[in-house]
Image: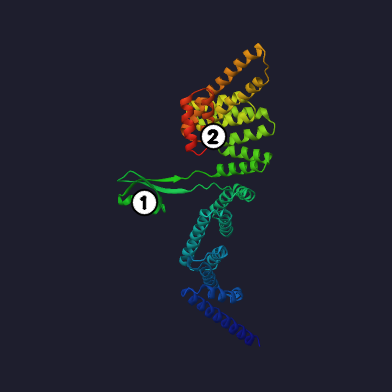
Amino acid sequence: MKNQLFIVALLLAVTVSFAQKKELRAVGKLIKTKDFAAAQTQLKSIEGMMSSADDVMKGTYYTYLAQANFKDGTTQSTDDLINAAKAVNMAKENGGDPEVVDSLADAIRTAVVNSAVADQGAKRYEVAADKLEAMYRVNPQDTAFLYFAASNLVDGVKYDKAVVLYNELQELGYTGITQMFAATDAETGEIKDDFSSAHERDLYVKSGAYIKPIIIKTESKAGEIAKNIALIYVSQGNNDAAIGAIEKARKINPDDTTLLMTEADIQYKTGNVARFTELMNEAAAKDPNNAELQYNLGVVSADAGDKDKAKEYYLRAIELNPSYPAANMNMSSMILAGEGAVVEEMNNLGTSSADNRRYDELKQKRKDIYLEAIPYLEAARSENEDVEVVRTLMNIYSIVRQTDKFKMMKAKLEELGG
């Protein structure tokens, strides 16, 4: 009786195995004829059989499933792409043909990247991020997908989601450092850094076409990630988390003055003036010949109410870059701000002899303010024909009776449509 049961079980196994092979052969034909929809339907109908299939059949099944979802790269569906990637991984784990599976995996990866790039170009940043993050979840060894997903979320101003991914990248210890295989063109002297492998580069070097083989390492993205986390927390008003993130970022990249300035701004806003002053002095000492940094120090000082210090920084920025438009504009604005008190006093004077004398003094003081501001406005205008700059200059030239310049600015204003 036992023998009979064994024979029946064996016959059943043979029958199931035969059915599996038959069904898979039918799917293979559908894949070859590019009838991917029918192949997907057929694969769904035999999904239950795979639990009892051997590794070869499972490998074949998942390879076909990947191909049916991928549709030779013509699919426009994110779900299809991700399902194809999952199926490829299953094919790898279950004895799929390595050559076929590896080639298919590379094609799917490229398709996802190209699709995400197209989304970026169309400013569908969150869609691109979803594709890239999904690919990372399928292939967690490829951490770059998670990094680019976070970058797309930043571009799409989806900071809440971006900071979650950035924190995950930090926990993973992601740096993004990659090796590039490079060599120098023997004829032109130019460095080629896009060899696909050391082997390919070495073959070119042996041929004599290239010399000086080297490995170039890309810069770490750890500092950028930490900085982005800090800036996102700043934008969310989470000052404590921001300062903690900045401290971490500065340990990774101590020379990044943007981080230093960001912390200074937070410290000022939270009332820590001592720390703010310390950071401002540190920033000025780090890069005294950086016009942009000096300008930014001026802006922060002005926001903090220290007008004299702000002027000092703006003048230093202009000394380093005489045509710096923003520094010249801010400097002229600070000078012209002094006009308000003068005009107010003029308006409050009476008609006595003393008041008349004071009025003349104030009138000259007002003119001196205008004359002091003119060079900065002219320098700002030399780099940018801004309507407001032109209008301001026109009005000032009129008041200080520089008639020719007034007429020139009036004509320029009309030309600009102001």
Mark 1, residue position: 202
Residue 261, quarter of the rendered image: top right
Residue 357, quarter of the rendered image: top right
Q: Give the percent coordinates (x, y) of residue 47.
A: 59, 74
Residue type indicated by callout 1: Asp
Considering every residue shown, the one lying at the far top of the view is 353
Asked if marks 1 and 2 touch (Cβ < 8 Å), the reply is: no
Q: Is residue 69 above or below residue 127?
A: below
Q: Secondary structure at mark 2?
A: helix
Residue type indicated by callout 2: Glu
Seen in the image, is 276 located left or right of residue 179?
right
- Classify mark 2: residues with Cα within 10 Å, few (<14), some (14-19) or many (20+): few
Of residues 104 and 315, the one nearer the viewer is: 315
Q: Give the percent coordinates (x, y) of residue 38.
A: 54, 76
**Can residue 198 be seen in the rendering of this structure?**
yes
Mark 2, residue position: 388
Considering every residue shown, the one lying at the far front of the view is 351
Quadrant assignment for the N terminus: bottom right
Q: Secondary structure at mark 1?
A: helix
At horizontal 56% and vertical 41% (from top left) the residue drawn is 223
Q: Is residue 5 above or below residue 110?
A: below
Of residues 391 and 57, the one nearer the viewer is: 391
